[in-house]
Amino acid sequence: EPGKFYDLEFELQPTFYRLPAGARLGLIVYSTDQGMTKRPLEDETYTIDLDKTQLIFHEM
């Protein structure tokens, strides 16, 4: 529904990187899943409420 925010959780496959102290990570949100991507392709706008967003990293 346009204009409505949804709570989503994703379990991502781990990729290991060693980052120097103070490094920053970026998050890119896009869709390339052929089975789920709308056809025909349309311009989409995604909005993320950063005040209510968190990334949780688990040490291994």
Image: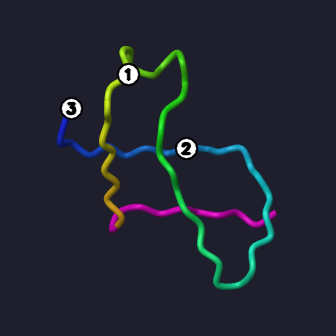
Q: Amino acid at mark 1?
A: Leu
Alpha-carbon span between mark 1 and mark 2: 24 Å
Does the CB distance between marks 1 and 3 fall below 8 Å?
Answer: no
Task: Provide the secondary structure element on which disc 3 rests.
Answer: loop
Question: 16 or 60, which lies in front?
Answer: 16
Query: Badge 1 local density, few (<14 within 10 Å), some, or many (20+)?
Result: few
Q: Amino acid at mark 3?
A: Glu
Q: Which residue position holds label 1?
A: 41
Camera-side mark, 1 or 2? 1
The image shows residue 19, relative to residue 43, as above or below, that is below
Q: Which residue position holds label 3?
A: 1
Alpha-carbon span between mark 3 and mark 2: 20 Å
Q: Position of residue 10 (x, y in %)?
A: 55, 44
For the point 59% across and 67% down, the residue is 25
Tell me which numbered mark, 1 or 3, is placed earlier along the sequence: 3
Tell me which numbered mark, 1 or 2, is placed earlier along the sequence: 2
The quadrant in which the C terminus is found is: bottom right
Q: Amino acid at mark 2?
A: Phe
Q: Quadrant of residue 45?
A: top left
Taking the image as shown, residue 43 lies to the left or right of residue 15, namely left
Taking the image as shown, residue 26 lies to the left or right of residue 18, namely left
In magenta, the rendered stretch is 51-60
Q: Main secondary structure of the magenta part?
A: loop
Q: Position of residue 18 (x, y in %)?
A: 80, 70
Q: Which residue position holds label 2?
A: 10
Q: Position of residue 50 (x, y in %)?
A: 36, 64
Q: Is residue 53 magenta?
A: yes
Task: Provide the secondary structure element on which disc 1 rests.
Answer: loop
